[in-house]
Image (cartoon, rainbow, N blue to C red):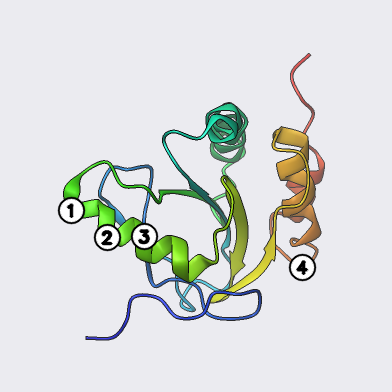
Amino acid sequence: MSEPFQNTSIGFLEPSDLESNGDSTLITISKNNPDTLYLLMTYANWCGPCKMTKPAYAELSRFLDKEKLTKIRLLAINTTGVLESEKNWGSIAKDKLGVTAYPTISVVQGGKVIGKHEHSRDMAGFLKTLLKHSDKHPHGAKLESYKPPQ
């Protein structure tokens, strides 16, 4: 059995299996989906900035669903683990992703971590990050068309 993670610094392979939103569903992000752009948030339940970020992350998710932007996926990993069975996994994910602060938001595509989110943790900031990495992406034009609700 191979290690579930390798070096995930920018330019290296991403984790092979990721838990999404604490529901114990494993989501595979692999080289088999080179056109899919992933925004991956690692967070901790006790983290105040993480809690403040979640509404904007949810808004972005609703926008992607509404616009049927299926080649852009949002993932979230609770690296602190709520269940005993998750605790070791969360620690491994945190170490392998190089998480030093919460939340840490990475951009993954084509089997590699290609960037880190460096903008505000709101809808506009997330869109800036996605646009920066979507110049050749099939959904890039639709991302540019987003108008925030008035």
Q: Position of residue 45 (x, y in %)?
A: 41, 35
Pointer 4 local density, CA inside 10 Å: few below 14, some 14–19, many at least 20: few
Residue at label 2?
88
Q: Secondary structure at mark 3?
A: helix
Does residue 18 appear in the picture of this structure? no
Determine whether 47 is above or below 129 in the image.
Answer: above
Q: Which mark is residue 85?
A: 1
Determine the secondary structure under disc 4.
loop
User: In the image, 6: left or right of 55?
Assistant: left
Which corner quadrant of the image does residue 136 belong to? bottom right
Labels 4, 1: front one? 1
The image quadrant where one finds the N terminus is bottom left
Q: Are marks 3 and 1 in contact (CB under 8 Å)?
A: no
Determine crowd level at label 2: few under 14, some 14-19, many 20+ residues with C-alpha closer than 10 A. some
Q: Which amino acid, by three-letter code, is at mark 1?
A: Ser
The residue that mark 4 highlights is 136
Q: Residue at x 57, y 75 (%)?
A: 110
Q: CA distance from mark 4 to mark 1?
A: 39 Å
Residue 92 quadrant: bottom left
Q: Residue furthest left?
A: 85
Q: Which residue is mark 3?
A: 91
Mark 2 secondary-structure assignment: helix
- Residue pictured at 70% horizontal, 53% vertical: 117
Distance Cα–Cα, label 3 vs label 4: 34 Å
Q: Residue 141, position in %: x, y?
A: 79, 51
**Tags 2 and 3 touching, CB below 8 Å:** yes
Residue 42 visible in the displayed image: yes
Nearest to N terminus: mark 3 or mark 1? 1
Q: Amino acid at mark 2?
A: Asn
Report the residue that reaches farthest toward the bottom.
1
- 3D distance between C-alphas at marks 2 and 1: 7 Å
Q: Nearer the viewer, residue 1 or 70?
A: 1
